[in-house]
Image: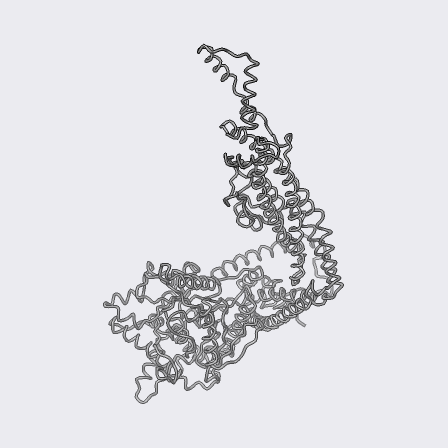
Amino acid sequence: MSPPGSSARHSPAASGASAERWLQKAFGEASVNVVDRASARREEARESSYGGARYERETERRAAPGTAAKPAYWAHGQAVDSSQDDGRASPKRFFNKANERLYEAYSQLHTMAQEFDKPFDSPAILVVGHQTDGKSALVEALMGFQFNHVGGGTKTRRPIAINMKYNPSAVEPRCFLMKDDNLGREDELSLPELQAHIEGENRRLENENGFWAKDIVVKIEYKYCPNLTIIDTPGLISAAPGRKFSGLQQSARLVEDLVKQKMHQRDYIILCLEDSSDWSNATTRRLVLEADPELRRTVVVSTKFDTRIPQFSHSQDVEMFLHPPARLLEPTVLGGGPFFSSVPSGRVGLARDSKYRSNDHYREAVLEREQHDIAELERRLDRHLSSHERGRIGVSQLRFFLERLLQQRYLENVPTIVPVLEREHRIATSKLSETVQELADLNQDHLKEKGRAFYQHFLEKIPEIVRGTLAAPPRIFGESLAHEHIRGGAFVNADGRPCMPQQPVPNADMRLFGGAQYHRALEEFRLIVNAVECPPVSREDIVNSCGVDEIHNGVNYTRTACVIAIARARETFEPFVHQLGFRLSHIARRTLPVAMYLLQKEGRILNGHEVFLKKIGGTFARFVDDRVKECQEKCHEDLKSTTQFVTWSLHSGNKAGLRNVLAPHEGEHDAKDEKRRSGGELVMSDKELKNCKLTDLVENTLWNRTMKSVTVDIVDMLVRQIFSGIRAHIVQSVELKFNCFFLMPLLNDFNSFLRNEMEDAFEISLDSVFDVKSVRSALESRRHKLESELEQMEHIQSKFASIHSQLEASSGNSPATQAAAKAAVGGTTFHSAAAREMAAQDEILRASHDLSEGIAEAKAQFAQYSPNPMRGSKAYEPSPRRSSAGRSRDRAPLSPMFHN
């Protein structure tokens, strides 16, 4: 076995010869139709030359006078004249009956993986390139006939998985289209019908300006087809920058994501197409390197080679392009180097603009183009091309290499596919049993029992979430305060701007849910409302609030302050009550998906009964809305009573501010008295001074409408004192009412509310609650799909089991095979022969160690008994074809140890 990444490991000769030897060993000499040893040696020599002899033979035959030109390489991988292929088994044809069995099994495996969205897939060739790289044209050349939608722009909008199968009896292509109903059905179509279907699907997606990652699965049988599975992907788009090309940029991103998703499938061989004469321009490789950094499962192809050759002026340039150095192209590329292909332009048809009248004419043109490229290269290099160089030039050589490479991957993956299919079969069987049981349980009594059990578990989850739990991940169900503002609304002032608290809200950056989020919302409400200041009082506000009394024309500034304060408080605090109710309703509603997640995590969710689950969710949402509305009404009543009648003991708050306004400072009186004495004025007594101040106060406050600055200050201070008292009362009252009339009913009263609602719904119409008709239809569809899946899986499983048993018998239960099977059972796969060998060595050492320990333990336990075997017992002798390490319990169903 060559080291990973070596050129010998991936050379065309090595990939072909090893696969043939494996087939001969597994299926016997007769299965590969080898007539004698001499013919086998000639076959091996022809393969090692990798196309040189075929080219010379074809050149001689075409040069012979009077000989009709025949496309040699279309005779399925051998230099055999196509006219001599009568459909019988030819000893010179490599792809024999055993190979057809192997390919057919993998073709069905790929179809099943695409239909039922399985986590595995079969090896396939994934064609990746830009729009103008000639992807679809190369695929047609590999197939030997034209069928695809080829042209400028984005023509391919869905990947096309083409399962090509060599059928010597199919003179014309036989096309089978897999249905998109996920039931494994296929329709046989004519070639024009298949073309019309693909073009129609592309036009539909083009009108929607979209792409679809699901493959169009096509099976084609043809006497000129290789045994290949090729997936043609949409062409990558190089969109120009700028807002003008935003639509094209969006399409480019969609295509890139689709192609990346396909390339990350480890079983796919990537066929990377480059349309460039300089290997430093990695247009397509740039994207491929993201999925395959070392290009170990990537075949690089330079397309439109016939247009590249005239661009080179010196032979050194041609040598550089044919043999790129490691600094330009990764030396670990699959195949050891790039391939070069040329496909002639023109379509097949009878129209005036058609260049080829038949597919035979088209195939001859492809072969002529290949020979012309070789002749032109030899002329420019002034030397003959080596067999290694000829093995990389032309569609026929690429086709031959891909066919052998894919066959080798098929053989390598057989040990891993069998246990994977067994595991998927067990999963599908379990799902089918559950579906059948659910169908049997669709009766009224059982549905009622299931419904009651479910909503009882649901009622247990709501208090658990409110009280606090770590069973649900906060990164999924939690919300930071910023996200809560976006989804549940923020507190805003009268101008519509968000209110910012003077102090930071605790746990603002944490992702909370349930009771923790509820407490944070109340804390934010308290901080924001306590920071709200009374709006300033103007002279106009005071004058308009004074008015005229019914029995005198004096002014009562105390009443004026009360009127202004309660009006300001009502218009300021009422919106906050609405905003808090909406916020808490949002927080409560978010507990519903958390509860459903917890029930699903515990396996108690009712799958398939979406109507019933919506009924539960709708009842919960209605209860939350009713409690929030009721709580808001109680808060409004409290706000109305607080702002309708002013109780001085409740609303006055701190009287120190008012006293400071009404009473002048003592230092101010002393300064005025000293000034009067120094001026020689008469000094009034204290009694006269008090009477004078009282007179001034009465004149300014009781009947003087000419407001002075002291009057405005007094009224403003009174308003602020009353506003502050109302604010403190509202904060405490609102928080108390939401706790008593919203939170507590959610924990205590919702149980009876939900039970009554659901029992009433059960009595009125059980079908409307569970939608039995739709559920039964969905379950029947699921059962039909699972039965179809199991039927296909059992059919494929039997094929792979047969192939695996023959390979296992021929390889003598090699440790590599055992290691591959064990890795597949554990959910992993081998993607290289080197990894398989290392795992095999570990398996050998582990088996040897376990065996020695077992022997020592047996000797210690049974040494005291009779050293001779018991009468009637038979000593166990291992089978000559089965080693002790090969009796893995994972493969017991495939290779039983005891035979009847």
List x then y, in percent, for residue 492: 53, 44
Nearest the viewer among 66 and 787 is 787
Question: Where is 432 relative to 683, above or below?
Answer: below
| Quadrant (top left, top right, bottom left, bottom right) of the N terminus | bottom left
Can the viewer see residue 405 in this picture? no
List x then y, in percent, for residue 422: 60, 66
Nearest the viewer among 141 and 397 is 141
Nearest the viewer among 631 and 248 is 631
Q: How many marks?
A: 0
Quadrant of the rendered structure where residue 808 is? Answer: bottom right
Can the viewer see residue 615 in this picture? yes
List x then y, in percent, for residue 779: 65, 68
Report the colour scheme.
Answer: one colour
Residue shown at 34% from the left, 87% from the top: 68
In the image, farthest residue toward the bottom: 66
Judged left or right of residue 674, residue 61 is left
Residue shown at 62% from the left, 64% from the top: 427
List x then y, in percent, for residue 482: 52, 46
| Quadrant (top left, top right, bottom left, bottom right) of the C terminus | bottom right
In the image, farthest residue toward the left: 313
Quadrant of the rendered structure where residue 299 is? Answer: bottom left
Quadrant of the rendered structure where residue 404 is? Answer: bottom left
Judged left or right of residue 236, residue 878 is right
